[in-house]
Structure formats: structure tokens, C-alpha cells
Amino acid sequence: MITFDRNAYDGFIFDCDGTLADSMPLHYQAWSETLDAKLGRRSDFTEELFYRCGGMPPRAIIEQLNRDFGYTLHPEKTAHEKETRFVELLPGIGPIPEVIAVLNQLGPQARVAVASGGLTDIVQQTLTHLGIKVGPGATIQFVIGADQVTHGKPHPALFLRAAELLEVPPMRCLVFEDAGPGFVAAKAAGMDCIDVRPFRANIHAAARY
């Protein structure tokens, strides 16, 4: 069970993929199929590397692959193709019960946002698929995707924007995350962070780095 001092915080910020949604395996499937097709061979983007990039915007991941492995992939086009494939796989996504329980305990009166390295529209679709409502009076008031800021995780911009929208000082925000770039971003934003991975009963081995 994930526990924390509720009175120590006024705002609560959740990552989406790997935190609220058990979507990381399907994201990796979408990455693998897209990259393999474009390269005409098996890509170098291993599952371990994928999880270490968790929270980074798709474009940034492709730019890193181009640098590290000498690929010449078009960042925007490749990212679009990957996200298109992920949307096709989206019906296979389930919730992460241990984190959803925390979200439900907070209730609609709490100030809650989702800040994700994914594109806002895709994150919205993922939450809708899980039956999580977003908007005034809903469990989650705001969704901030990587397309809403100049720099994605590990830069703190996503979390700082979430705090701004929630009208809560960063030091009074608590972040729920599952990946290295997100932990770095939360610390840089001056926020406390809970790593949800140790609390998950079912988690892919590669995610336990």
C-alpha cells in the first residue's frame, strides 16, 4: 500500500504510463514494430533502454537513438507513426490498481494533475480508456503532455506547469512516478516524489532497474 502524509501536500501530480496505466509493454511493442519496420531490421532499442527512457517525449527518444546508434530517422514522422501504432494497441491497456487506489482516495476535492512525457491527446485517450475523468470537478483536473512545454522530462517544466495550473507551490506538490527521467524532473522542480514501482504487484522485470 502506498502511504504518505496527506496533510504535507496541497497538490498531487501523477505520471500516466507505468504509473496510472499499465501501458509500458504496449508502448514498447509500438516502438519495436515501428523502428524495426523503418530500419528493415531489429532495432537497438532494447527493453532495458526503453524503460530507462521512460517519461521522455517520443521525439527526444528518437533524437537520442539517432545520436547513439547512427540512425537517420525523422523525429516527428517516426514519433507520429509510433503513436499511431500505440493507439491501435490501446484497448489492451489496463490500470495499475495500487496507484489508482491512491487516486481514488484523494477524491474530487483534491488538486490533482497528470504530467506525462506522452502527447496530451494520447494521454487523454489512455485515461478515458481507464474510465478516469478529467476536468473541473473530476478526479483529475488537468492533463499536461510533452507537447505543452518546451522541454520534457527530465527537465522540470512539466511538473512546474502542473503546479502552476493547480495553483499550488511546487514544494507543496507530491509526484507519483515510475521512471528515472521523472524522478530527476520532480527533484529539479523542488517536489517530493514517490517511486510507485516497489508497490506494484505485477511489473515487468525490465522496469525494475
Image (spheres, grey):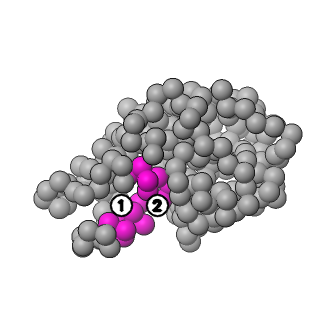
Residue drawn at x 44%, y 42% as measured from the top left: 207
Q: Which mark is residue 79?
A: 1
Left or right of 180? Residue 141 is: right
Residue drawn at x 45%, y 33% as measured from the top left: 203
Q: Is 39 colored magenta in this rendering? A: no
Vertical side of 139 occupied by 202: above or below: above
Left or right of 191? Residue 199 is: left
**Which is more N-terminal, label 2 or label 1?**
2
Q: Nearer the viewer, mark 1 or mark 2?
A: 2
Marks 1 and 2, Cα distance to the nearest angstrom?
A: 9 Å
Q: Position of residue 92 (x, y in %)?
A: 38, 32
- The residue type indicated by label 2 comes to Pro
> How many numbered discs sit on the rendered protein?
2
Q: Which residues are magenta?
A: 50-65
Left or right of 123? Residue 65 is: left
Q: Is 55 colored magenta in this rendering? A: yes
Q: Main secondary structure of the magenta part?
A: helix
Q: Which mark is residue 57?
A: 2
Q: Position of residue 106 (x, y in %)?
A: 75, 33
> Which element type, helix, strand or loop, lies under badge 2?
loop
**Image quarter hosting the C terminus:** top left
Q: Position of residue 201 (x, y in %)?
A: 51, 26
Residue drawn at x 76%, y 51% as measured from the top left: 173
Q: Is residue 195 visible?
A: yes
**Image quarter hosting the N terminus:** top right
The crowd level at tag 1 (other Cα within 10 Å; few <14, some 14-19, many 20+) is many
Residue that extends furthest to the front in the rendered view of this protein: 209
Q: Position of residue 136 (x, y in %)?
A: 74, 44
> Which element type, helix, strand or loop, lies under badge 1?
helix
Left or right of 78? Residue 37 is: left
Q: Which mark is residue 39?
A: none
